[in-house]
Image (cartoon, rainbow, N blue to C red):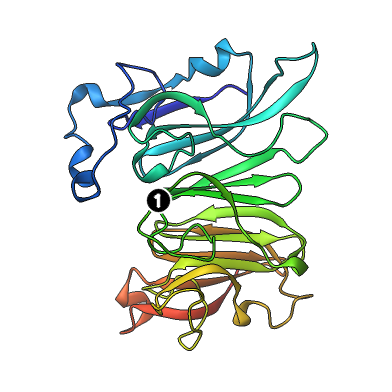
Amino acid sequence: GALYIWGDDRGGQLGQGSGEDDDQPVKRETRKAAIPKQNDADFSTAPAAVEFFQWRGALIRHVACGLHHTLAVAWEPASAGAGVVVARLYAWGFGDRGRLGTGATGAQKLPARVLLPICDDPHSGHVVAAAGGDQHSLALLSDGRVYAFGDNEHGALGLGRASDRPVELPEGVALPFRSGGAVRVSCGARHSACVTASGAVLMWGFSDEGQLGLGPEVASLMSTRRDVTASPLESPLMSEQPGKWGAEDVALGVRHTVVLYRNQSAKVSGRYLSDAAFGDADRIAAAAVVVVA
């Protein structure tokens, strides 16, 4: 369908193409100051169509938002052959730390194609969904593969390493072989997750508030920091009864995680927002069950 968008546009995340794209890289120590102060011209309260896709004759099949960037999966005519439609991932907005996956690091005010290392063959694995975090993104393919790009300081890309060096072009996430591939992806501020075809939930990234649900005794992988897990891990507490607890979906907040299971229950982990509701403890490192009525 058509894509409509509104809100803050200081990083170009509305995709309206106002002004010139800024391709100048932003130094890490000044990236907070790179988003200018808001004025009346920097936001929109009325939904407006992203005309870029209308010009291309594209249909939008999936959308996702990060902190200052936007992602969309578009079905559009292939350049070769009439009647052939291909799925492509586009990104726009603030490109600091490689979160757009386009190779650009400045403000991208019109949608630009994410440079996934896949071909346009409609019969091969194609992009079906995406997710955006503070400064990183994930892309999900129809064959279960997951690609990641952007900031990797806290291992949120799941590449087996945590590094201050950003990943500006998509790289494949090494999911466990027995997982059967991913069917859902989600990003938090600095952590990531996917639901696999087997119903498992894999999580990776920052766990300073217990948001990975791995329990306090689980050591991190490929990192000397116990609050960083740089490779996908399946929570042992979320897989006690695989047949009964098979996951259907996962959603990530800034510092917490919610998983929806087939038995109409949910499990949560991470930072609690209300001490009045949950007592003195303000975080939970392991997954806890919430029964959905």
Vertical placement of residue 16 versus 240, above or below? above
The answer to whether residue 166 is visible is yes
Spot occupied by residue 87 in the image (x, y as percentages of width and height): 68, 30
Which one is nearer the viewer's eye here, 31 or 281?
31
Spot occupied by residue 44 in the image (x, y as percentages of width and height): 32, 25
Q: In the image, what residue occupies the spot 60% across and 57% down? A: 173
The residue indicated by pointer 1 is 166
Q: In the image, what residue occupies the spot 32% across and 71% down? A: 274
Is 224 left, or right, of 195 in this rendering? left
Vertical placement of residue 202 versus 46, above or below? below
Other residues around mark 1 within 10 Å, as few (<14) / some (14–19) / many (≥20): some
The answer to whether residue 293 is visible is no
Spot occupied by residue 258 in the image (x, y as percentages of width and height): 53, 65
Q: Secondary structure at mark 1?
A: loop
Vertical placement of residue 34 versus 273, above or below? above
Q: In the image, what residue occupies the spot 40% across and 33% down? A: 104
Q: Quadrant of the N terminus?
A: top right
Q: Residue furthest bottom?
A: 217
Which one is nearer the viewer's eye here, 169 or 3?
169
Is 189 left, or right, of 37 in this rendering? right
Spot occupied by residue 227 in the image (x, y as percentages of width and height): 39, 75
Q: In the image, what residue occupies the spot 56% across and 10% down? A: 55
